[in-house]
């Protein structure tokens, strides 16, 4: 598919934009609900985002401390505005986490959004996992922990090593490109066991291990709550690159979805209320593209 013919947002100018010929990367500054009202109906094929979780995270501009019921209502309103912007065959991937003491919140958000969409898949994003291996007699032969954890100092709660990715669609009938993020069969005899399967690649399933990159100290962290770039990349691939013209992240942060789109060569629109995060995102995309090739861009 080619780049979208028109700008996704007819009535607002981007804060920063890169026109790369085959695709564009645009960042819009403003409140999410105000901005979404300006976007063209049905313009986004994939929405992938991580909203504020209402857990008191210290963002630069946003205060992450709404009364709980207002937060749920706000998230429902955002999901309704996103529904107008999502194409009929589109996918909306919503990454949600929570505080250990309020573990029903992501489910309550999913329930309220589920009034307006179908919940097509629930994916578990695993940040760290321990794998034990046993020999045939049941003796432990190895134990390996991989990924990073944020310790929880409590005798009541386990370390929080996962978050949800709710995959909403309008009717629950969106065909996915499962092989694009597939994994090799462990038992190769299964390659031809299933009808229609010719390749050594199977469905990855709904548990995705995606670690954060290692950083040495928190002062190196330019934003307090990001997801790794591979997360939006998996979502976009799973929806299907061929049927994706435009990807939208309405809570852009420092642009990990934008980076995924730049590497996949897909048009992208990101919204955030904070100009510093948007400027940072823009510069990250520029340096990624410059690393990949020399860019003839028309930065605005
Ligand atoms: C969890 S972060 C997103 C991080 C992003 N996924 C990344 O990897 O960088 C949520 C972002 O939403 C933005 N935000 C919060 N409330 C907003 C609002 N009402 N309108 C626009 N942006 C908002 C914050 O500034 C923050 O950068």
Image (spheres, rainbow, N blue to C red):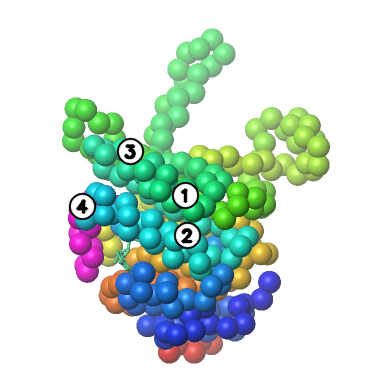
Q: Which residue is mark 1?
A: 115
- 17 relative position to 199: left or right: left
Callout 2–callout 3 Cβ contact below 8 Å? no
Badge number at residue 67 = 4
> Disc 2 and disc 4: Cα gap in Å?
25 Å
* Residue located at (26% from left, 39% from top): 102
Callout 1–callout 2 Cβ contact below 8 Å? no
Nearer to us: label 3 or label 4: 4
> Disc 3 and disc 4: Cα gap in Å?
15 Å
> Disc 2 and disc 3: Cα gap in Å?
22 Å
State which tag comes first along the sequence, 2 or 3.
Answer: 2
- 267 relative position to 17: left or right: right
Callout 3–callout 4 Cβ contact below 8 Å? no
Q: Is residue 113 above or below residue 28?
A: above
State which tag comes first along the sequence, 3 or 1.
Answer: 3
Label 4 CB, ligand 1: below 8 Å?
no
Q: Which residue is mark 3?
A: 104
Helix, strand or loop under label 3? loop
**Quarter of the image where one finds residue 146:** top left
Characterize the local packing of mark 4: few (<14), some (14-19) or many (20 or more) Cα atoms within 10 angstroms: few
Helix, strand or loop under label 1? loop
Q: Which residues are magenta?
A: 53-65
Q: Which residue is mark 2?
A: 48
Characterize the local packing of mark 3: few (<14), some (14-19) or many (20 or more) Cα atoms within 10 angstroms: few
């Amino acid at each position: 598919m080619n780049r979208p013919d028109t700008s996704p947002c007819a009535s607002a100018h981007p804060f920063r934009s890169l026109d790369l010929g085959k695709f564009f990367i645009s960042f819009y500054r403003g409140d999410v609900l105000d901005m979404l009202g300006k976007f063209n109906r049905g313009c986004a094929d994939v929405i992938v985002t991580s909203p504020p979780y209402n857990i008191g995270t210290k963002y630069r501009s946003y205060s992450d401390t709404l009364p709980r019921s207002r937060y749920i209502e706000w998230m429902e309103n955002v999901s309704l505005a996103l529904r107008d912007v999502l194409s009929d065959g589109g996918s909306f991937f919503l990454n949600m986490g929570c505080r250990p003491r309020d573990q029903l919140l992501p489910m309550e958000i999913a329930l309220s959004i589920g009034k307006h969409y179908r919940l097509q898949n629930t994916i578990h994003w695993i940040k760290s996992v321990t794998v034990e291996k046993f020999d045939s007699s049941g003796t432990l032969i190895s134990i390996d922990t991989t990924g990073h954890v944020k310790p929880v100092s409590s005798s009541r709660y386990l370390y929080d090593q996962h978050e949800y990715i709710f995959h909403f669609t309008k009717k629950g009938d969106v065909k996915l490109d499962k092989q694009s993020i597939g994994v090799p069969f462990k038992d190769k005899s299964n390659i031809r066991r299933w009808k229609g399967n010719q390749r050594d690649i199977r469905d990855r399933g709904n548990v995705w291990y995606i670690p954060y990159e290692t950083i040495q100290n928190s002062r190196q962290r330019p934003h307090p709550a990001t997801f790794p770039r591979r997360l939006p990349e998996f979502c976009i691939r799973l929806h299907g690159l061929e049927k994706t013209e435009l990807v939208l992240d309405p809570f852009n942060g420092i642009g990990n979805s934008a980076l995924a789109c730049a590497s996949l060569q897909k048009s992208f629109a990101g919204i955030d209320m904070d100009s510093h995060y948007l400027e940072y995102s823009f510069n990250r995309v520029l340096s990624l593209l410059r690393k990949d090739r020399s860019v003839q861009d028309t930065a605005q």
